[in-house]
Image (tube, grey):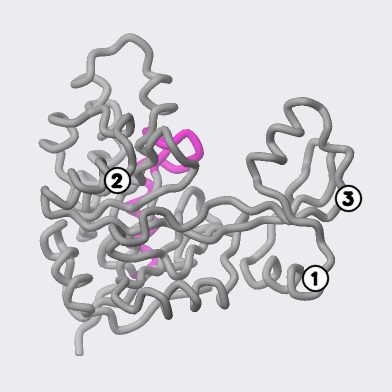
Amino acid sequence: MESHKFDMHVHTRETSKCGKLSGKDVAWCYRMAGYQGIMITDHYHKEYFDSLGQMNPREKIECYLSGYRAAKKEGDKIGLDVVLGIEFRNVETEDDFLIVGITEEFLYQYPAIYKLPLRQAFKLFHDHGMLVIQAHPIRFTVADNSGENEFRTYCNNELIAMVQQNPEMKEISFSEWKDAKKQKRAGKFSYPLLLRLCQLQCEDMLDGIEVYNGNIQWAQEPDKIDRILREHPEYLRVSSSDFHEAAHLGRGGMVLEQRAADFRELKQVLSRQRVMDWIRR
């Protein structure tokens, strides 16, 4: 049976400040890694659009789409399917959501959707036939010290092992730690320090979750993900790389039973659970 490797959480340098590679280079990386398709999910939130200054809303959306369009243009040349998505965050939370089925027309019509209350935004997505997948819903990392280089680069399994082997490790929220850093009070903590970020939001309105996120700076504990899936067996299950740089390439993704050349085909594959395997590295 023919299979198609697809990654639906990918960032570009043009749009996401944390992205290290251009859309063109991202397309080439994934093509060389044997993937048939990707969904570009650059960060869609207030901070990004505020950073664009005094542009009008349409001009801001043009800037936002630049990374996707560069990847799409190159993908069309080299035989890589590139689908438009967004990693959405509203002003209420620090949580992120992958939106499947987004279109350029929708973004031009609702450029400031991140200002809406979360449930209202989700309803608008659903009213337009989109899927809402919560990205990395249970996420943590470990701070080694209170100096300038707090975080070492771990693989997901190493972070999980650290937590399992150090049950006495103090745990606080990432936002609490950031506030302490800003106020120069981070030295009061005992290190290593477990930092939690993201929690399940609007559970009744989600279509699915990332069961695995390949970002090497963060991890999700499998038992907590399993608990969510037991409580919500209806959720679609997604694995992705959360690609920002070359080190993230191919760390996640899905092996699909059929091609997903556009958002309609991707929605269909996910909704019909045509996923043969999940890539987790």
Please state which of the two labelled residues, at mark 1 or mark 2, is closer to the viewer.
2
Question: Mark 3 to mark 2: distance in Å?
Answer: 38 Å
Q: Residues within 10 Å of mark 3 (few under 14, many from 20)?
A: few
In x, y percent, where is residue 46?
39, 28
Residue at the image position 47 percent from the left and 33 percent from the top: 17
| Above-or-below relation of 35 to 28 | below
- Closest to the observer, 167 or 261: 167
List the residue tagged with mark 2: 119
In x, y percent, where is residue 94?
49, 42
Q: Is residue 26 magenta?
A: yes
In x, y percent, where is residue 171?
74, 56
List the residue tagged with mark 1: 167
Locate residue 203: give its quadrant.
Answer: bottom left
- Furthest toward the bottom, the residue is 1
Residue at the image position 25 percent from the left and 75 percent from the top: 4
Locate residue 50: give its quadrant.
Answer: top left
List the residue tagged with mark 3: 190
Q: Is residue 184 left or right of residue 175?
A: right
Residue at the image position 22 percent from the left and 26 percent from the top: 62
Highlighted range, magenta: 12-34
Residue at the image position 40 percent from the left and 69 percent from the top: 239
